[in-house]
Amino acid sequence: MKGLDERINESLDILIKNEALIGYELRSMLKSFKEEKKEVGYSFGEICYWHYEAFTDCLNEDIYKIAAAIELLILSFDIIDDIQDKDSNYSWSKTPELSLNVAVSMLVMASRIISGTSFEHKGTAIQILEEYALRSINGQQLDLLNICRDEQSYLQMIDQKSGSLTAMGCLIGEVLAKGEISPEVEEYGKYIGIIQQIKNDVQSLKAWGPKNDLLNKRYSLPIIYLLSQENDVSKAVINYYKDDIDAILDNNTTENELTNGGAIRYAITIKNVYKFKALNNLENVAINELGKDFLKKLMK
């Protein structure tokens, strides 16, 4: 029996091959980008599948097309995000002008693919895709503006940017199965996205290089915590963020303060709060143990 990732990948290959409205150049780049994406797996498509499987009595094979469509949308957002941040080693960052066309074509294809399936509630699924995609774009705009500089506004931003996309996958699967959505699924779907973003924020600070949020004067939960402390390191970082020409960051001292001064622990504590909330909601949803195990892995 083929694994779920393999089924989604096969569907992607077929859908890309059969899309008649894109030419050779676009198709070649799309296939290439998809191959790079394959290395990290198709967790958003899997989220959709497990929620569909949980609420349906008869599995419609078109669910793999839906999962593939969601992965196309997610990949398009990844491409756009990497081009905006200018911090990626993926091939799409090497030709940003051409890659943007590929990303836009993926967005359109995602909606067309869902529309072409045999699901009774596909229209509602498209509405969910559009609504939560727009919420995520709004969150990405706030992130790029770098204006969320306190805990509340930052968590609200990643709720939109990251939480909307994981909630979207959950809700599309649910609505295709039963024609309606439930607040518990939406809530833990968002929480999973927030957890993933906080994990990424912490990971960013572990490498003192071009992707480090602090060196790039970005705001994240650990950095917000660090900036709130009244000590020599926080004062140096504040001056660095203010573009003070005399500001000097000592790598070792700053890394030590992030790790041992409470900033990383604070972010992990917030992450665990959302994990606890997500697990509580998940217990009230009738997903089988395989599906629950998959979702729990995303919360670690």
Image (cartoon, rainbow, N blue to C red):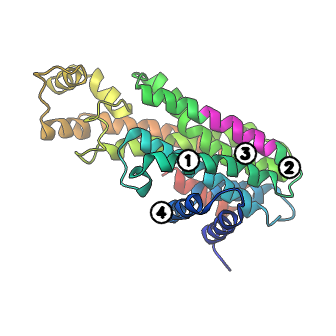
User: For this rendering, which residue is in front, 108 or 4?
Assistant: 108
Could you say where residue 260 lies in the image, as x and y percent from the top left? 23, 39
Q: Disc 2 versus disc 3: distance between alpha carbons? A: 11 Å
Marking on residue 171: 3
Up the image or down, 236 lies above or below 186; here it is above
Residue 71 seen anywhere in this rendered image of the structure: yes
- Asked whether disc 2 touches disc 1, contact meaning CB atoms under 8 Å apart, the reply is no
Q: Disc 2 versus disc 1: distance between alpha carbons? A: 35 Å
Amino acid at circle 1: Asn
Looking at the image, which residue sits at the far right?
A: 120
Q: Disc 4 versus disc 2: distance between alpha carbons? A: 34 Å
User: For this rendering, which residue is in front, 185 or 95?
Assistant: 95
Q: Which residue: 52% across, 39% down?
A: 194
Residue at numbered disc 4: 36
Looking at the image, tell me whether mark 3 or mark 4 is earlier in sequence order.
4
Q: Disc 4 versus disc 1: distance between alpha carbons? A: 17 Å
Label 3 Cα crowd, 10 Å radius (few <14 / some 14-19 / many 20+): many
Q: Which residues are magenta?
A: 124-135
Assign a secondary structure to mark 2. Answer: helix
Residue 284 seen anywhere in this rendered image of the structure: no
